[in-house]
Amino acid sequence: MSDLPAVSPQHLRQPDLSALRPPFSTHKPRILILCGSLRTVSYSRLLAQEAARLLDHFGCEVRIFNPEGLPLPDSAPVTHPKVQELRALSEWSEGQVWVSPERHGAMTGIMKVQIDWIPLAVGSVRPTQGKTLAVMQVSGGSQSFNAVGQMRILGG
């Protein structure tokens, strides 16, 4: 302790490395997939379903939220059943996959509505904080990747 003369030895403990590690999970990784399309047959929905199949193959428990019937933000109370379903799934998840087509140079409105209904802070924690987030976009032709960029910003 001669190199730390201002420190009292009883207040300077080596960290307990086992206490710093999060406990190992006893269940499959829980992944929520949000899709920014309401069309029954859409490339975004097909991509979301393929991602779900791959994640299931790798041992994840996957749920895809169906945004049909989700109200616009501020047009219904947070007690709306679809809002409650989305929030419960977001809280349940340990990772999320957001899939959206690009429409008019941006993610779709339905994708943004889903993100808007997920509360920004629950107990001062963002719903995606500490979780893995993958973002994917489907666009035809030579369009840009604006939707991916927007989802990265909103999810980060």
Image (cartoon, rainbow, N blue to C red):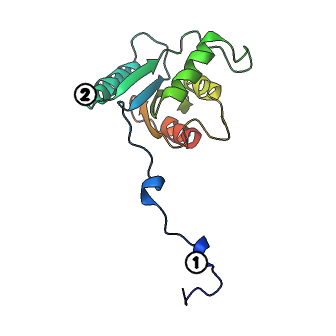
The residue type indicated by label 1 comes to Pro
99 horizontally vs 153: left or right: left
From the viewer's side, name the closer residue of 143 and 111. Answer: 111
x and y, in percent, of residue 38 in the image? 49, 14
Residue 79 coordinates in the image, percent (x, y): 69, 14
> Can residue 4 be seen from the camera position used here?
yes
| Badge 2 element | helix
Q: Is residue 15 above or below residue 111?
A: below
- Indicate the quadrant where residue 74 lies: top right
**Above or below 81: residue 156:** below
- In space, the residues marked 2 and 1 are separated at their CA atoms by 52 Å
> Which image quarter is the N terminus in?
bottom right
Using the image, determine if residue 45 lies above or below residue 138: above
Which mark, by number, is residue 63?
Answer: none
Quarter location, residue 120: top right
Above or below 1: residue 139? above
Residue 56 coordinates in the image, percent (x, y): 30, 26
Residue placed under numbered mark 1 in the picture: 9
Query: Which residue is found at the position 67% from the left and 41% from the top?
Result: 124
Residue carrying label 2: 57
Mark closer to the observer (2, 1): 1
